[in-house]
Image: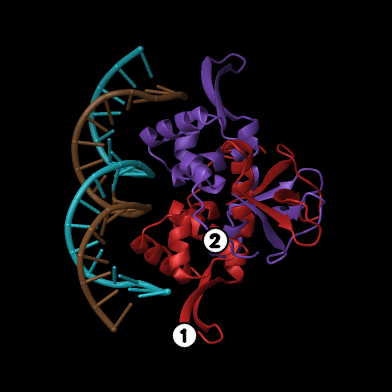
Chain colours: A red, B purple, C cyan, D brown
Amino acid sequence: MDAPTGVREHCTIAATLDLVGSRSSLLLLREAALGTRRFADFAVRTGLSEPMTARRLAELVDAGLLARADYREPGQRVRQEYRLTPAGLDFLPVITALRQWGDAHAGVPGGPPIAVAHAGCGAEVVAEVRCTHGHPVPPGESVVTHLR
Amino acid sequence: MDAPTGVREHCTIAATLDLVGSRSSLLLLREAALGTRRFADFAVRTGLSEPMTARRLAELVDAGLLARADYREPGQRVRQEYRLTPAGLDFLPVITALRQWGDAHAGVPGGPPIAVAHAGCGAEVVAEVRCTHGHPVPPGESVVTHLR
DNA sequence: CGGTATCCTATAAGATACTG
DNA sequence: CAGTATCTTATAGGATACCG
């Protein structure tokens, strides 16, 4: 990439970070990606306090990444659940890329505690940088084409 | 994905967020990915204050994502520069995925202010979730295979 | 179970002024 | 140009107690 000048006031990365860039939001989105749906599970599995869990889940619903709904398992009483919306599912590349970098560079002794595989073939799931024509794009082979 | 239980104390995503998960760190990594190398440019283009820019650049050097070096342009005096290390280059999928989500869901009127294209063919650069066998992995077609 | 209310601390981040 | 020093504010986040 080259180095275009100018202040990036309206960069969509900055807007994304303002919306869902806190540690707590990203941990909750990680959990949602792993299939967690209930309030108490979100709180325990992320290690977040209940007030923070409540505040951030509400923000993620407002931001359109999660949807809240009642559901009832057979023979059980009504419970609440939080599920990824289409916009929330679109966030999976971010979560995957974070896990991939962490596994490679922020690893704990004994290897990564979570592994994700393709259901079809069993191979590890990763985030790849490609162009829309399908070519892999290694670092240095991309250019900024437009800067407003 | 299914929903495995248990607290994820040692999740590498959490470790990654603790290391480089602040808004300021991620904005600086965005700039480094766009080719920015000099202190004053990092500060102006991210909109961060100079003290915050200095603190976070030092953290990113300590964390191994940036390397600092002197350099001299022909006929100029010695300057400092910050460049992505191999670990920093490995962070590009995260930045790409954040930009992609922001362009789609946190967009500003008039379209994204920055566009990145493949140098080889001109097509847009995106982050894709795939398995290491090369298959695209849409949401719901991955499974957690290991949880320690 | 699924939260809310209240209070507290730590840190993210900016403003301003200054230095080699 | 590339920072540092100092101070202040805003927010992230936890602890504890409580509610329908």
Judge left or right: residue B64 versus residue D17.
Answer: right
* Residue B112 appears in the figure: yes
Q: What chain does mark 1 sit on?
A: A
Number of marks drawn: 2
Judge left or right: residue B148 versus residue B131.
Answer: left
Amino acid type at image mark 2: Thr
Name which residue lies at 45% across and 43% down.
B24
Structural crowding at the residue carrying mark 2, measured as other residues with C-alpha within 10 Å and reported as few (<14), some (14–19) or many (≥20): few
The quadrant of the picture occupied by the N terminus of chain A is top right
Dividing the picture into quadrants, the one containing residue A111 is: top right
Q: Where is residue A135? Give x, y as percent.
A: 81, 49
Find residue B29 and name its label: none
Q: Where is mark 2, residue-wise? A: B5
Q: Nearer the viewer, residue B144 or A58?
A: B144
Find residue A77 and name its label: 1
* Residue B111 appears in the figure: no
Name which residue lies at 49% across and 60% down.
A28
Q: Where is residue B61? Give x, y as percent.
A: 51, 28
Residue at the far front in the pictured view: A75
Q: Is residue B72 above or below residue B34?
A: above
Name which residue lies at 46% across and 32% down.
B59
Q: Is residue A51 above or below residue B25?
A: below
Q: Is residue B52 above or below residue A71?
A: above
Q: Nearer the viewer, residue A105 or C2?
A: C2
Tag 2's secondary structure? Answer: loop
Q: Where is residue A89? Give x, y as percent.
A: 62, 66
Amino acid type at image mark 1: Arg
Structural crowding at the residue carrying mark 1, measured as other residues with C-alpha within 10 Å and reported as few (<14), some (14–19) or many (≥20): few
Tag 1's secondary structure? Answer: loop
Judge left or right: residue B111 versus residue B61.
Answer: right
